[in-house]
Amino acid sequence: MARGTVNRAILIGRLGSDPDVRYTPSGTPVANFNIATNRVWKDRDGNPQEETTWHRIVVWGRTAEVVKEYARKGSRIFVEGRIQNREWEDQNGQRRYTTEIVASEIQFLDSPAGEGGGSQRTVETPDLEPPETLDTEGGEDVPF
């Protein structure tokens, strides 16, 4: 870590859709999903206001497969990781940019189906470097 700097994001939110898991040409799983976080406040007149922010999450390796197995649309999840900005060129030659959280720890905050308690599952990802090339089948603008 560079001295005097920190790149760390901690979020608790709800999944906007089921995770999408794909595999790199070398077989490494990578999961992508979005979570929503909300901010609530009162305006000058005392009326409650709410704002939703969407965050793109990327998870690599075995954790990607665990996320696919346990996380579902609407699930409450804790994510810790680093913020990453990327740019690429889409199929039409346009420059595209994205900001995402590369997760290093995931906790599933909802109770598993059929259990009454508030148990949590925690999954930590090892420090994996993303491969140079990704399997881009599917023709989306995002390269995985």
Image (cartoon, rainbow, N blue to C red):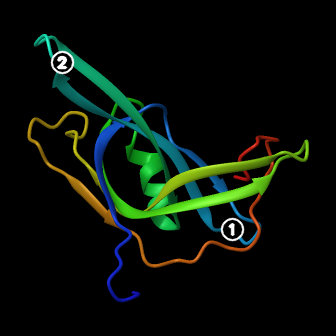
Q: Secondary structure at mark 1?
A: loop
Name the N-terminal-most of marks 1 and 2. 1
Q: Where is residue 39, by image quadrant?
A: top left
Residue at image position (14%, 48%) is 119
Point out residue 112 in the picture as x, y percentages from the top left corner: 24, 40
Q: Is residue 105 above or below residue 94?
A: below
Q: Nearer the viewer, residue 47 or 125?
A: 47
- What is the three-letter code of the residue carrying label 2? Asp
Figure quadrant of residue 6: bottom left
Q: Is residue 77 visible?
A: no
Q: Quadrant of the N terminus?
A: bottom left
Amino acid tagged 1? Gly
The label shown at residue 141 is none
The residue under label 2 is 43
Q: Is residue 76 left or right of residue 69?
A: left
Q: Which residue does the numbered mark 1 point to in the structure image?
A: 27
